[in-house]
Amino acid sequence: MTAHLRRFALPLLAVPLTLAACSPADTSVGDAATAVGGEIDKTGAHPAVPVASAPFAITEIAQFNQPWALAFLPGTPFALITEKGGRMLLWEEGGAVQPVSGVPAVAAGGQGGLGDIIVLGPSAADGKVPVALSWAAEGDGGFGAVVATAAINPGQAPALTDLKIIWRATPFVGGRGHFGHRLALAPDGKHLFIATGERQKFDPSQDMTGTLGKMVRIKLDGSTPSDNPFADKGGATAQIWSLGHRNPLGLVFDDSGTLWSHEMGPAHGDELNKVERAANYGYPIVSNGDHYDGRDIPDHPTRPEFRAPDLWWNPAISPAGLTFHSGQGYPGWGKSLLMGGLSGKALIRIALVDGKASKAERWDMGARVREVDVRDDGSIWVLTDGPEGKLLKLTPKG
């Protein structure tokens, strides 16, 4: 029976978090601690409502060619926008859109290209803002995700300077899908989390010798923190924070320091997860979706040793972009996550109450939503997908 015909309401048992020993050559599931969440989301359903009913007004601001990520430079009128084809642009509110020089060459094709961009801290004395960026590159074995730090000088003739590659996916493989390469700066400002896809190869998600299908935690200089769960194993294994992921395209900390990620399931079964130390999220052994050819994948309740998703979607929404919103300007919202939907053509709000996530509104945006971000003033900004992707500003109505 396929997952999209099932509706579960089975409570999952708590499993103690233990670390089993592993060697660098061992690829067994037992290498990682396993943990489950609370009661699994009882249904994958989440029907859309017309965007006209939303509490925000939408203003189209600009248009881009396959925009992928958006990062506002705090305290300035500027934002950085990446385009999958390899361009980075400096957008100024009420001003010009300028190309940024110094962007590394990318392997644009399939789902790969220029990826995420995030701000790492306040501007320096010279006005430069530290950033981290990701992209798909070609190398030995095929293609893989790369992450670098750099600095940007907003203003005239913007350029990336001091570019330093701090991480490469292990291994590079053939194909151009499921790079992931979403980034999140930890609240301590010292550690970087990297969401990596399993590159449509399935088994790497459970292979502890590589970083595909994992959440990775490193320092900003690219070194491995000594308190990572598998730090004593060395190599790529030492970088792993969690495993069993498929195609994560959203990663964000909320104001309590909880790290959230969403990922595309196979045929349905998209997930929202709390990212927990040493947890195994089960893919490809379990999923609330099935293979695209119709073959069954056992659902999460069949294997309670794996960490179940906090929420899941069926039919698929193809989540992309994830941000935290305090509720400022929107009475009744409270703390929330906002996420986009590609195939779902939606903006989705997830309510956060006492550390638990629940589905709130899903607004039909009429376009594939690639990215969502929140500015310091609480305004919501959306990038739609495609060669005529739009930058939209969402502000409270009346």
Image (cartoon, rainbow, N blue to C red):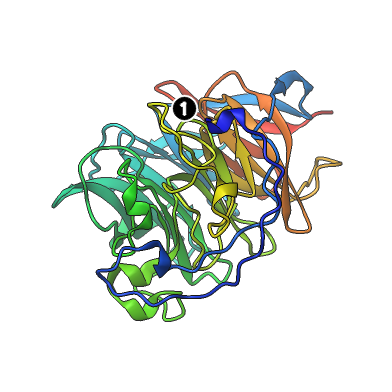
Residue in the image at 67% along x and 47% along y: 40
Which residue occupies the extreme left position in the image?
140
Q: Is residue 319 left or right of residue 8?
A: left
Circle 1 Cα neighbour tier, 10 Å, few/some/many (<14 / 14–19 / ≥20): many
Q: Residue at x 49, y 72 (%)?
A: 190
- Percent of width and height locating residue 156: 40, 45
Residue 94, percent from left and from top: 57, 33
Quadrant placement of the C terminus:
top right
- Residue 77 seen by the camera: no
Camera-nearest residue between 144 and 102: 144
Q: Is residue 256 left or right of residue 306?
A: right
At 31% across and 62% down in the image, what residue appears?
167
Is residue 141 among the parts visible in the rendering?
Answer: yes
Q: Nearer the viewer, residue 356 or 32?
A: 32
Instruction: Please tell me which residue is depicted at 58% across the width and 27% down the height of the picture.
Output: 315
In the picture, measured across the screen, residue 218 lies left or right of residue 372, that is left
Q: Which residue is mark 1?
A: 385
Quarter location, residue 218: bottom left
Element under disc 1: loop
* Residue 328 on image: x %, y %: 78, 47
Q: Amino acid at mark 1?
A: Asp
